[in-house]
Image: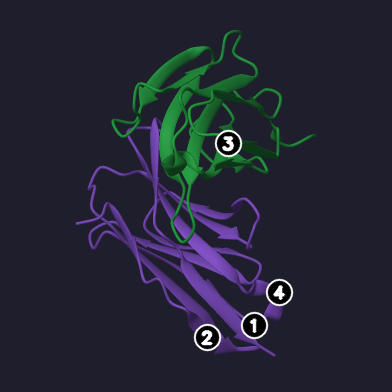
Amino acid sequence: QKEVEQNSGPLSVPEGAIASLNCTYSDRVSQSFFWYRQYSGKSPELIMSIYSNGDKEDGRFTAQLNKASQYVSLLIRDSQPSDSATYLCAVNIERGFKTIFGAGTRLFVKA
Amino acid sequence: DTGVSQDPRHKITKRGQNVTFRCDPISEHNRLYWYRQTLGQGPEFLTYFQNEAQLEKSRLLSDRFSAERPKGSFSTLEIQRTEQGDSAMYLCASSSPGTSYEQYFGPGTRLTVT
């Protein structure tokens, strides 16, 4: 079992719709969770961090964490073509010493 | 506030040669990470520094890889006797002291081994 798993996609949504990206992780002691956006040929860009159960909203983005289910998700409201990218889920193991990334989910937003 | 910088941005080398990459983190960031990323995969953790101390090194890293952060500021990653399988994007990230552990990435160094 991979430590951080994501559906590779591609996930295709129409412009203006909600995109839902999911991630599961295997290490129960993980404390910090992150979502990064990566455009083709570019480096990852941090868009959200979440540390406690529940929802965290930032603009059009909402991160959701359920530690009991070892599940973290990212919702993108009012999706725009510029949101088309690969979204990486990352999980911190051992207080920042090691961060494990999922393989990413490719998102396409159709105009 | 300048971001994380990496040099060079691109490197083409022949198999068997040694290469060295440099990373300058965001100022005041005491944590520094190196990753390797290949096409279609997420970044793969290589090593972690807190100030000048190397506190974690991936078991996946062979002895041909070494990293340093001598004064707790910039860091270097050296690959000796490069192999074609070393071709990848090498990413550096830094994070600030404290409990957030949010990492900010540099633009990466793309290595091609011919």
User: Residue under mark 4: which chain is it in?
Assistant: A
A58 w.r.t. B70: above or below: below
Task: Choose the circle earlier in sequence order: 1 or 2.
Answer: 2
Cα separation, mark 1 vs mark 3, equals 30 Å
Q: Marks 1 and 2: which is nearer the front? A: 2
Q: Which residue position is annotated with label 3?
A: B93
Say which chain tag 2 marks: A
Q: In this picture, is A58 found above or below B18? A: below
Residue A12's tag is 2
Q: Characterize the local packing of mark 1: few (<14), some (14-19) or many (20 or more) Cα atoms within 10 angstroms.
A: some
Q: Which of A11 and B85 is in front in this view?
A: B85
Q: Mark 1 points at which residue?
A: A78
- Between circles 4 and 1, the one closer to the viewer is 4
Quarter that holds the N terminus of chain B: top right
The reply, left or right, for residue A29 in relation to residue A44 is left
Chain identity of mark 3? B
Callout 1–callout 3 Cβ contact below 8 Å: no
How packed mark 4 is, by other alpha carbons closer than 10 Å (few <14, some 14-19, many 20 or more), is few
Is the residue at mark 4 from the same chain as the one at mark 3? Answer: no
Name the secondary structure under disc 3: strand
Q: Mark 4 points at which residue?
A: A82
